Image: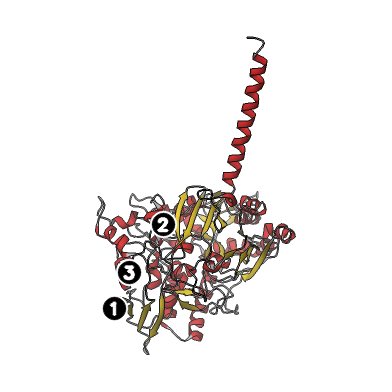
Amino acid sequence: MSTFFPFRRRWLSIVLILALWLSCQLIFTSCNPANFKIQAAQVSQWVTGTIGDPKTFNYAFNQEYPHVFLFTAEGLTTLNGMTGKIEPALAESWQISDDKKLITFTLREGLKWSDGEPLTADDVIFTYQDIIFNSKIPTDWKDALKIGSTGAFPQIRKIDNRRVEFSFTEPFSPFLYTTGGPSTNSVGILPKHALEASLKSHDANGNPQFLSTWGTGTDPSKIIVNGPYKIESYTPSQRVVFWRNPYYWRKDKQGHQLPYTERIVWQIIESTDTMILQFRSGGLDTVLVSPENFSLLKREEKRGKFTIYNGGPEFTTTFISFNLNKGRRQNGQPLINPIKSRWFNTLAFRQAIAHAINRKAILTNVFRGIGTLQDSPIEPQSPFYTPLRKDVKVYDYNPEKAKQLLLNAGFKYNARNELLDADGNRVRFTLLTNVENKTRVTMGSQIKQDLSKIGIQVDFNPMTFNTLTDKLTNTYDWECYIGGFVGGPEPHDGANVWLPDGGLHVFNQKPLPGKQPLTGREVPEWEAEIGRLYIKAAQEFDQNKRKEIYAETQRISQEYLPFIYLVNPLSLAAVRDRLQNVKFSAVGSQRGALWNKYEIKVAE
């Protein structure tokens, strides 16, 4: 027996080595999204990525970007990424009355949902009347549709199966933009036959079951959509797979069904660094290009068989913001430490912070010069942007001026040059951002260093995106954060940020329906005035007059600084050359990288 043991050990070793090798091959193969297959049959597909798991499959509750509805949802209209103009989508046409108080939409003939059921005017009525206008449904879609100072919703009436009529108490110029589906984060039409029952049934607390319908744990086959793709599968922390919707309405000029590509794999990747690695190794077909990796990817462009597209400045705002909410919870506990709340609500404090941040250094060191300084809530490429005027404050880097502002406001310095308030409390606060975004993390490190030069201690705490958004929109447990909003040509898209009761009015958030109410929340006059101006601009159809109204919102926001704007990056993306029909733009869904995804062809 002892004679055979050495051979047995050698045989076992060989088997173990082979098993380990096969396991590694399986692991690496399964992790590479380029090798993702169905029933071992290769299909036309392209692979893109995102840094976090989706939070919902119910478009009415979406508060993130990017989101799955970029692939699955459609509205009555859409925004052309190349022209920036509103075009027909589910609605083939519309008519506006002479007094601008009546808009009639005509749906395309033969529209269907992804399960083959007809899409009719009843679905439009359901989406608006039963969901958006329903006081028990806390959707951000409400904010963009509140009309005038009363906040009334338009009336909606079914004419026949293909025609619906919206009537307004006063002219409402942004309405066509609000119907633009996922290209502008606006209203997407939802299926009545799949969701109506969840509105009529209630949970133990008396809330509609709709509030918990189509969460990310839902069987994807139950998610009924009208966009170019439907959700085939979702594996948390790994991927969302989209499959061609066979009932999508678009056809090409030759009458061929769109979209051309059968499948899109949306790979969930924990960091932008890892995303770039996967793109360079061939695992991704598209990736957003940040300033940190632009030079590296540009050198590899030809060899890697991809093209870096530049759409100009992004339709985004990047900023830091302080929590100005003075509210208290039901148990009497303030949201923010009252000492820190006094600092944050002191205008001179916010203006000093703005002067203390070296934005030019951020542009040079963090963005590698690939961007522009930002001094407005309205992006420069919007037709409603007004070039900076003398009455609009611009906060150039000036730490000495920052110190003087603080001293004039009652702050003081100790012997160690540490900033104290009038009561001797050390000025110290926590700065948050999402850890997956390397650019923001780098920005945060510099902001911490900049503020230390005026004696402020910043505790910088990057965290996961989902944890951060929970603090911002649910618990309100935050002091200061680096964030950004994705916008578009129409400023009213940001009404939910600027209206005091808006769902994304994060710097002084009013709890949404179903959330625990607050006591003692205050809305100062400047904050209310911005909200009134947004309402006034929506009433005006003269584009020049609207531009002047939005210029005033720009002046007020720069005076009072609910957001301290930083740098506006360029819209850059790397796209494999095998993807054909790419029409790159800074406007539209996917930040313009693939707004016309239904036209993308894959050349193998």
State the CA–CA distance, disc 3 to disc 2.
18 Å
Please say whether residue 432 is visible from this viewpoint.
no
Point out the image quarter for the C terminus.
bottom right
Callout 2: SS: loop
Callout 3: SS: helix
Please say whether residue 93 is visible from this viewpoint.
yes
Question: Which of 244/519 is in front?
Answer: 244
| Label located before the other in sequence (1 or 2) | 2
Q: Are marks 3 and 2 in contact (CB under 8 Å)?
A: no
Q: Is residue 303 above or below residue 159?
A: above
| Label located before the other in sequence (3 or 1) | 3
What kind of residue is marked 1? Asp
How packed is label 3: few (under 14 Cα within 10 Å), some, or many (20 or more)?
A: some
State the CA–CA distance, disc 1 to disc 2.
30 Å
Q: Which residue position is annotated with label 3?
A: 123
Q: Are marks 1 and 2 in contact (CB under 8 Å)?
A: no
Q: Which residue position is annotated with label 2?
A: 57
In-image side of 129 versus 309 (left or right) = left
Q: Is residue 525 above or below residue 96?
A: above
What's the residue at 33%, 80% (across, down)?
Answer: 168
What kind of residue is marked 2? Phe
How packed is label 2: few (under 14 Cα within 10 Å), some, or many (20 or more)?
A: many
Q: Is residue 219 above or below residue 79?
A: above
Q: How is the structure coloured here?
A: secondary structure
State the CA–CA distance, disc 3 to disc 1.
12 Å
Q: Residue furthest top?
A: 1
Q: Which residue position is annotated with label 1?
A: 160
Q: Quadrant of residue 409?
A: bottom right
> Where residue 562 sits: x, y (%)?
50, 65
Q: Residue furthest bottom?
A: 98
> Where residue 490 sits: x, y (%)?
49, 75
